[in-house]
Every structure is written in C-alpha cells, then in structure tokens.
Amino acid sequence: MENTEKVVNLERPAVLNHLFFEQSKFNILPSSFEELDSLAASLKAEPNLKIELRGYTDKIGPADKNLILSIDRVKAVKQYLVSKGIDPIRIRTRGFGDTQRVYTGQDTELRMKNRRVEIVFVR
C-alpha cells in the first residue's frame, strides 16, 4: 500500500532557533532542551498533529558529510521528542545538507543561520 500522507505547509516552516549541536556533530546541547521540551508539550496537546523535521547545514565541509550530518541531527531531535513521550510515527525526518542555504556569504554569524532544523506540519 502506498503512503499517501502529504506535507502541507499550514504556514511557513518554523525554525527551532534555540536548537544547538556540538560543532560538526549531532549531539544536542543542553541549552536546547527548553525549546525541545516546549515542542514536545505542543505535540502532546495536539495528539493528531504530525511533523516533518528538516535539517540543514552550512557549506563548510564536504557536501556528502553535510548531508549525513543534517540527517543525523534531525534523527537526534526525533529521538529526543520520542524520549518525551511523542509517538515516533508522528515525526518524519529529512536532511538536506548544505543544499538550501538561506545565506550564501562568508560572515560567520550569518552563516550559522544555515545550520538549522525546521518543522513543517503534516496532514
């Protein structure tokens, strides 16, 4: 049977602005827990809501490693949410590596905006 679930952008993707990882790794830093706990609480309050987590990296490093890193990071976020009681079936993950950058310059602080996880609501 084919999966007919479609991604529906109910609004612009939400960016987890306070989600931080170890440099070049997928370990979530403790400073991220408050935002992730808030997301988990929101998901518990809306038990029929499903999400897709989309991971992105900056351009530093090889593209193939960035793709793997983006996938590992969204999987880590999913694992965290599952540990807080969210059914894993409600969370889809996708990694895009450095292919969809929001900033293409060399400024270090602005380049950090490319290292992000977005949430898209799914129906």
Image: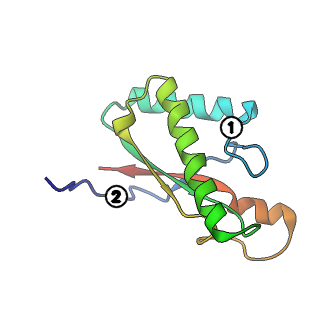
Q: Secondary structure at mark 2?
A: loop
Q: From the viewer's perspective, is 64 left or right of 111? A: left
Q: Amino acid at mark 2?
A: Val
User: Residue 109: where, in percent of width, then height?
Assistant: 84, 61
Observer-side mark, 2 or 1, equals 1
The residue drawn where x is 72% and y is 70% is 59
The residue drawn where x is 44% and y is 23% is 85
Residue tagged by mark 2?
Answer: 8
User: Residue 11: where, in percent of width, then height?
Assistant: 44, 57
Q: Is residue 4 above or below residue 91?
A: below
Considering only order in the chain, which callout, 1 or 2, is on the residue closer to the N terminus? 2
Q: Is residue 57 above or below residue 93?
A: below
Residue tagged by mark 1?
Answer: 28
Q: Is residue 46 above or below residue 51?
A: above
User: Residue 76: where, in percent of width, then height?
Assistant: 57, 39
The alpha-carbon separation of the residues under discs 2 and 1 comes to 27 Å
Q: Amino acid at mark 1?
A: Ile
The residue drawn where x is 62% and y is 46% is 16
The crowding category of the residue bearing disc 1, from other C-alpha atoms within 10 Å (few below 14, some 14 to 19, many at least 20), is some
Picture quadrant where residue 21 is located: top right
Q: From the viewer's perspective, is 51 left or right of 13? A: left
